[in-house]
Structures are given as C-alpha cells and as structure tokens.
Amino acid sequence: MSDSQPSPEAGRTPAADAANADAAHQAPAGPPASGALSGRRALREGAPQSKSMFKRRPPRAKSGEPSRAGRNLPAAIGVGLALLVSLLVGMLFLPLAFVALTTMIGVVGVWEVGRALEVRQIKVPTVPALAAGVALPFAAYLGGPEALAFATVVSVTAIALWRSLDPAPDAARSIMAGTFVLLWVPFLLSFAMLLLQEPSGPIKVATLLLLVVANDTFGYLVGAFFGKHAMAPRISPKKSWEGFGGSIGGAMVVGVLAVVFLLDRPWWVGICLAVAVVAAATAGDLAESMIKRELGVKDMSSILPGHGGVMDRLDSIVFASPVAFLLSVTLVPGTL
C-alpha cells in the first residue's frame, strides 16, 4: 500500500469504535427490507412519494360524539321523537294530560331561564315565576283568552309584590327579569292551549308541532350539507340562509299535506301557515341564541341529551304558537 492512499484505520478513535459496536449490537439481524430503506430514505430526502406512503386518514368520529352541527344525533333524535309522540298521544286522546305535560315542560323552561340569568347576577323571583308557569297554561285552556289575560296580570303583580318584600338590592331589575321570563315562556306557550280549544283544536296543534319539527329537521339537514351563507353570524353562526330555505320547503310540503288531509282545507292555507310558522320559529331560535350569547352560556341546561335544555327545544314553539293561533282565528274565517 502506497503512502498516498489513506489507510482504512485513519481517523478511527476508541470512542468511534465503541459507538460502532453499540450500533452493530442494536441493529436487527438480517438485511433490512428494501421497501423500508426506500421509505426511510424518501422520508429523509422529502421525496414526493412519501406523501402517498405516509398519508394520514382523518380520525373517525367516535360513537356519541357531536355531529357537524354540534349535536349528538342519536340522542337528539331519540329524545325528540319521545317528546313528540308523548305530546301527540296526550293531545289526541287525553287533552288535559297534554296540558299538564306542556305545563311541566314550561315550568322547567322558566327554571332554566332563571338559572341562566343568575350568571349575570340577575335574580328572578322563583316562587311566583314558577307559579305563573303553572297558572297561565291552565287558565288559557280552561277559560280562554280572557282568563289568560287575567292570569298574566295577576302573575306580574305577584312578582312585583314578592320582590318588593325582599330587602335584597336590585329589586327593579329582578322584577323586570321575572316579567320577561313570564311573558317569554308560559305566556307565549299558553297560546297553544288556546289553539287546542279551537274547533278541530287537537289537529291544529298537531299540525303546529309537525311544522315546527319540519322546520328543525329540514333546516338542519340542508344547512349541514349545503349551508354557506350565515343568516346571523354574530348570533347563531351555524344557521344559514340555505338551511332557512330548506326549512321553508320542507314545512310547505308538511303544511299542504296536513291541511288537505287532516283539516280538509285548501292547499294554499298550508303554504301560508308553513311560511308564517317557519318565520316565527326561526325568530324564536335566533332570540334564544342571542340571549345565550349575551349571558355567555352554550345551552340553557343539559337536561335533554343531544338537545341541551328544555328551552333549546321550546324556543321555536313559543314564538310559533301565537302565530298559529292568530292565523287560525283571522285567516279567512272558517278556513282553518
């Protein structure tokens, strides 16, 4: 060997020999697979094929996790169907039981709103507010519009007297909050009881419930898959104009079928009823979303799996009930 050629022993040190020995000891027996070598080399060198070889799949949604619209769909569908069937059965076969069940739901809604307002240190007079939640629907069902008006005045007076006897501060704000809760939940909900007392009342209330369900269902489906333009981004970012169009289209189909086959009325009545109910239900949904956003809460409570609180389901019905009742008594007398 000539002096010009470097010796293979040149540059070796005891530390290098020890590192090589450890590497040889830890290396797996046998030659590595060519695919593994190419994959590692491609990964090190940033070769284009590494993207296809090591592409990650998006994680699958686990059972029970919220869907694209933020709901647990199986739980939401199950709870919604249970509520709808219970209301329909009670209304068609035992109207007084329907009134009692609706009243109980309204009382829970009053409690939820009062509890949510406490986040902003607003105290609702609980006892008179809950008593009003019971009195107003039964007054509407048993005595009609006059009884509902009288019960409302008495309930507002009771809230004012109850809070005036309490030495705690912020009495005026508390009275206003109690009156707001009373008018929002039991008062508006009582119009469904007035509608129940109309001729063919059970069928009209059933039509109202079906239209509200159609509004929620078709709006959710169309909005989840095609929604791109937010209706009110600051209030409810997930509610889109596409979903609103789906609500109107689905409710029109349900409304026409209901008035033709259940109420034996002209088809155009179903169109008018569907548009009015969807507009009112959407306004109620946006109103509740605005209140929750102001209070800084996601749901009024977590009583109903997949839905949140009772008010997260009542928000559409409480606004739609007065509209349905007014159309029943004013839209072409005798048509509805």
Image: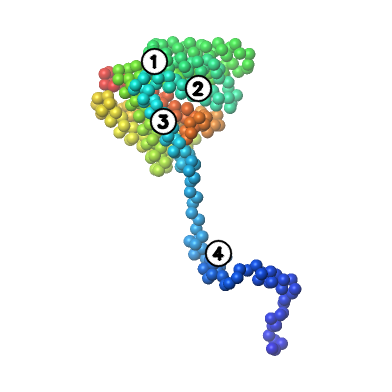
Label 3 CA crowd tier, 10 Å (few <14, some 14–19, many 20+): few
Which secondary structure lies at badge 1? Answer: helix
Evaluate if marks 2 and 1 touch, with contact meaning CB atoms under 8 Å apart.
no
The CA span between labels 2 and 1 is 19 Å
Q: Amino acid at mark 1?
A: Tyr
Q: Nearer the viewer, mark 3 or mark 4?
A: 3
The image quadrant that residue 244 belongs to is top left
Precedes in sequence: disc 3 or disc 2: 3
Kindly identify the residue that appears in the image at 44 percent across and 20 percent down. Answer: 103
Q: Amino acid at mark 2?
A: Val
Using the image, tell me which numbered label, if any, was put on residue 110: 2
Q: Nearer the viewer, mark 4 or mark 1?
A: 1
The CA span between labels 3 and 4 is 54 Å
Precedes in sequence: disc 3 or disc 4: 4
Q: Is residue 158 visible?
A: yes
As drawn, the residue found furthest toward the front would be: 29
Precedes in sequence: disc 3 or disc 1: 3
Report the residue marked by disc 1: 141
The CA span between labels 3 and 2 is 21 Å
Q: Nearer the viewer, mark 3 or mark 2?
A: 3
The CA span between labels 4 and 1 is 74 Å
Q: Nearer the viewer, mark 3 or mark 1?
A: 3
